[in-house]
Every structure is written in structure tokens, then in C-alpha cells.
Amino acid sequence: MEIRQLKYFMEVAKREHMTEAADALHVAQSAVSRQIGNLESELGVDLFIRQGRRVRLTPIGRIFLENASQAMKMLENATREVKELLDPERGTIRISFPISMAAYVLPTAISAFREQYPEAKFQLKQATYYELIDLVLNGEYNMALLGSVPMNGEKLDGHVLFKERIMALLPINHPLAHEPALRLSQLKDEPFILLPKGMQFREMIINHCLEQGFEPTISFEGDDVDALKGLVSASLGISLLPEVTLIDNFPRSTVKIPIIEPSLQRTVGMIIPTDRQLLPTEKIFFEFLNDFFSKWSAANII
């Protein structure tokens, strides 16, 4: 069995089409078909069901794909580790993150890191909270930045980098806009503008409201934080957002006010796997993040 055969097999499984897979691999279709045939002969099973020009995995093919994918990830990691052990300051850091960290937290940290390690490279992937956890669990990424940080589990270690306040964002002409701080209960009759269902931050906000004796009325929802801010600035409702999304980027026609009763906060940090080691360059970045955020300005973090 050859690595080339596994690569061809995985591409065909992904596209379910021999010709499209060959085009993506920049080889002739006959070469792909031949290698898939050789692989099936070696294994003694059919991995695909042929349906004209299209193909689909057999049940055994799906099992083989799952294991082949894990094997390829391990091989890729092993190759990267060898290269990074020789020169860890020039390696690649692969990290996933949520949209709330995209505008300020992660770029600020990467900029500071590149001052010390200018030749380090990054591969970044944005995802939702639960997708971030899955990316680390299934081995696609070794690191994810997220908030709130999940408790340590059997397969994940959570590391808190800092805590931040949850802020109310109100239109500047709102009756409560001049208050220095707010009780969450003061917002019970307001139309809320929140992230969509399935987002962990939305779940946290709704749970806090329920604990204060009311269920928020949700007038608008969306997965773009800047769009939520824009809706607030148009006086279409109020929103609750992590303070880090409002540090230097919120509409002039809005005001941000802390919630003091209850004191709403969330943890922000990293998750890494317990069943595999960080690669050398990733380890340098992980240690840098812990040091960097421990010194981050108290004006930005609670």
C-alpha cells in the first residue's frame, strides 16, 4: 500500500467522481482508476460502488476512509514535527478560532508573536464554538482559541487566558444609554439582537436571562457580530456582546454599558488535546499566549 494510493482514494471519496478527483490531483483519470483498483485488489474488497461516472463509498469504504484519514493526519504531523524539531521558529501554527476573536484578540496576539518569531507561519480556520471543539477532538487542529473555555475532560485540556465582561450594547438614544451600569433585569422588555441558535454564546445569554426570571424577546439574529452592532445602531433592539468585540470597534450611534447584576463574564482561552503532543512551533505559540495575555492591559480585561 502506497501513500499515493491513499491520497487518490481520499480525493475520490471526497468528490465521488473519478474525473473530478483526477483534475484536483492534476493527474490522468486512468492513473486514479488504476491506483484505486490496485488498492481494492490489495485489500480484497470493493471500496466504491460505481454508478456511471460517479462513485460512492461502500460501507467498508467508509470505515477505511475514516482510518485512512487518521493515518494521513498522523503522517502529516510526524513530517511537520521532524521539520520543526530542526527549526521550530520557522514552523507552521495551525489554530482555529471563533468570529468574536477574529477582529482583535487573535490578530493582536499573532502580531506580537511575529515580532519575536518573524519566520513563523500560520494557518487559520474560523468556526463556531462546537465546531472548534470537534476540530481539536478529531485531530484536524491541535489548538483552538475560544470562549467560554470548557472544563478539562478526558480528551481536551482547557487553559484560561483571561476573563472578559459581557457588555450591553444600546442605541445612543435609548432611555438607559446614560446609565453607568445595568441590571440584566432592566432589559427584560427590550427586543434582543443575538447570535443564531446553536451558538454557545447565545445559549449563555438566554440562560442568564432565565435565571433573572425572564425569557428574552429575540427580534433579530445573525452570525456576524458587526451586523448585530449595525442593527443596534439602527435602534432595532439591544444586544449583549463580549467586551473584546467592542474594544475599538462599535458604531458611534451606540453605547456599551457593563452588566453588574449579575456580573456577566466569560472565560477566554485555549483548548488542546490530551492524547497527542503539540508540535514544536505550536508549543512555542501556546507558551507565548499564556505569557502575553497574563500581561495584557487591565483596561481591556477583567
Image (spheres, rainbow, N blue to C red):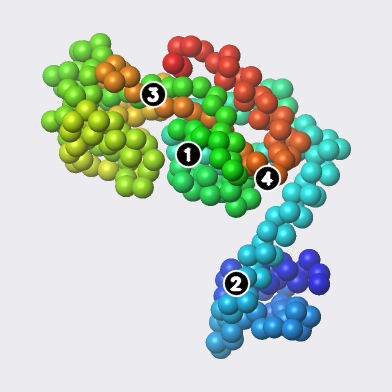
The alpha-carbon separation of the residues under discs 4 and 1 comes to 23 Å
Amino acid type assigned to the residue bearing label 2 in the image: Arg
Q: Quick one: 39 or 24, which is closer to the camera?
A: 39
Mark 1 vs 2, N-terminal side: 2
Mark 3–mark 2 CB contact (< 8 Å): no
The alpha-carbon separation of the residues under discs 3 and 1 comes to 17 Å
Mark 2 vs 4, N-terminal side: 2
Q: Which mark is residue 275?
A: 4
Element type where label 3 sits in the image: strand
What quarter of the picture does the N terminus occupy?
bottom right
Relative vertical location of residue 48 with respect to residue 210 in this rendering, above or below: below
Identify which residue is drawn at 53% across, 30% down. Answer: 269
Mark 4 vs 3, N-terminal side: 3
Amino acid type assigned to the residue bearing label 4 in the image: Asp
Q: Position of residue 9 (x, y in %)?
A: 68, 72
Q: Which residue is mark 2?
A: 62
Identify which residue is drawn at 64% across, 19% down. Answer: 291
Relative vertical location of residue 104 with respect to residue 198 in this rendering, above or below: above
Mark 3 vs 2, N-terminal side: 2
Task: Specify the quadrant of the image occupied by residue 144.
Answer: top right
The alpha-carbon separation of the residues under discs 1 and 2 comes to 30 Å
